[in-house]
């Protein structure tokens, strides 16, 4: 049941299940740890939970990358620098890792700024679906991507955009209007720009593997996470010791310092909750870099899975934590997402047949080659 081939629909389904499971945990814990103390919740502010959860996720990713030796990335070409042998891909894995360091905190901040996990996921995930399609268009134009994007995938993108518009333009219950929040727009802008660069670089790696050259997704992930961790640690140290002239007296920076010097009692639990977000990172990257698929398809699968997880997390938060029940427009957005999933499923069936045909043709060429040499 769990034995699947690389690049198969079954392997993709397994990755989606893991992504869904850990994202539900992530969505619920964000609301739990930031719930009001008078209601029996820890009452952490956004910066406290951001620090602890980021630490937990980062530690998990680093542990796996080092303990299992994933950082020893396989490459067809290496550089020698400072006595260390580096894969040639490190030149663009470093900026990808820096972008990852931006994506991690902005994701948690969006959950804190918006009224529900469901709304946050629709806005963030829908934005990434759009930029995934842009990346495909750019790489097709550059000659990097040889595959075509099926019309079903383009239709799915349109429905995803419609889902985003429902939440962005429609505002939200409780007087919150997304477009009027400078903080939310700044965080979302940083998130989208970082993801745009990151998705381009991941797909550049995937689409430039020569024939017979291994696509080492684990190695890419490990090195990316190491770079991201170094960048995040540097940023935290800078903020911790920043003087007032460099923003050290900002309320958020003060909260960050207090989270380190005077941690609230449930901080170990917040670190543990952050490990669920760290687990999400594994499935997220492996879906984005899934073999034989376009960025449009992989981005849609990745984001739509998390959107459904967001709905589930919002419902669980409502019935267990007393969080708000999804508004009508939230359900409309989800309906549009499910329509996108339907078109995406049709596209995957086509892609599966295409991959089978390509494999059969390659096998046939391999069998004919010895005969041709002999004659």
Image (cartoon, grey):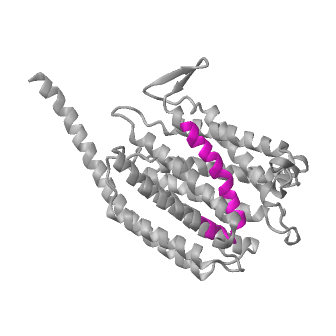
Where residue 256 sits: x, y (%)?
82, 51
* Residue 339 visible in rendering: yes
Where residue 255 sits: x, y (%)?
85, 55
Residue visible at 34% across and 57% down in the picture: 149
* Residue 309 visible in rendering: no
Q: Going by the picture, which residue comes out furthest to the top?
A: 83
Q: Is residue 155 magenta?
A: no
Residue visible at 72% across and 80% down in the picture: 174
Residue visible at 34% across and 49% down in the picture: 141
Residue visible at 46% across and 29% down in the picture: 75
Q: Is residue 187 left or right of residue 126?
A: right
Considering only vertical position in the picture, is 157 above or below 233?
Answer: below
Q: Is residue 313 left or right of residue 10?
A: right
Q: How many marks?
A: 0
Which one is in front, 306 or 237?
Answer: 237
Q: Is residue 372 left or right of residue 318?
A: left
Where residue 229 sits: x, y (%)?
68, 40
Q: Going by the picture, which residue comes out furthest to the bottom?
A: 328
The residue range painted magenta reads 93-121
Which one is in front, 282 or 125?
Answer: 125
Where residue 8 sits: x, y (%)?
39, 49
Q: Is residue 97 magenta?
A: yes
Image quarter (top left, top right, bottom left or bottom right) of the C terminus: top left
Q: Going by the picture, which residue comes out furthest to the front?
A: 245
């Amino acid at each position: 049941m769990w034995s699947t081939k690389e690049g198969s629909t079954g392997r993709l389904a397994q990755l989606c299940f893991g992504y869904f499971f850990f994202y539900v945990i992530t969505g619920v814990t964000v609301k739990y740890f930031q719930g009001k103390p008078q209601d029996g919740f820890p009452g952490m502010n956004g910066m406290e939970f951001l620090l602890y959860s980021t630490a937990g996720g980062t530690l998990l990713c680093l542990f796996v990358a080092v303990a299992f030796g994933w950082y020893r990335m396989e490459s067809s070409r290496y550089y020698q620098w400072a006595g260390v042998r580096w894969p040639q891909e490190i030149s663009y894995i470093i900026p990808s890792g820096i972008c990852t360091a931006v994506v991690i905190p902005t994701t948690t901040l969006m959950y804190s700024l918006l009224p529900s996990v469901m709304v946050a996921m629709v806005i963030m995930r829908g934005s990434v679906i759009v930029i995934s399609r842009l990346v495909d268009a750019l790489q097709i134009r550059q000659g990097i991507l040889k595959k075509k994007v099926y019309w079903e995938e383009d239709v799915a993108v349109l429905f995803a955009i419609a889902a985003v518009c429902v939440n962005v333009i429609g505002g939200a219950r409780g007087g919150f209007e997304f477009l009027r929040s400078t903080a939310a727009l700044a965080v979302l802008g940083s998130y989208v720009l970082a993801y745009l660069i990151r998705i381009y670089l991941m797909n550049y790696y995937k689409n430039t593997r020569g024939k017979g050259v291994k696509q080492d997704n684990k190695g890419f992930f490990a090195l990316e996470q190491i770079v991201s961790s170094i960048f995040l640690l540097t940023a935290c140290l800078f903020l911790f010791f920043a003087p007032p002239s460099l923003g050290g007296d900002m309320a958020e920076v003060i909260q960050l310092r207090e989270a380190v010097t005077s941690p609230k009692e449930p901080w170990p639990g917040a670190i543990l909750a952050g490990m669920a977000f760290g687990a999400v990172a594994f499935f997220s990257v492996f879906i984005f870099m899934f073999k034989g698929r376009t960025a449009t398809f992989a981005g849609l699968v990745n984001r739509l899975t998390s959107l459904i997880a967001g709905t589930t997390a919002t419902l669980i938060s409502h019935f267990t934590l007393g969080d708000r029940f999804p508004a009508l427009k939230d359900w409309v957005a989800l309906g549009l997402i499910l329509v996108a999933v339907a078109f995406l499923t049709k596209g995957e069936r086509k892609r599966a047949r295409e991959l089978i045909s390509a494999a059969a043709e390659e096998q046939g060429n391999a069998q004919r080659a010895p005969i041709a040499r002999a004659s």
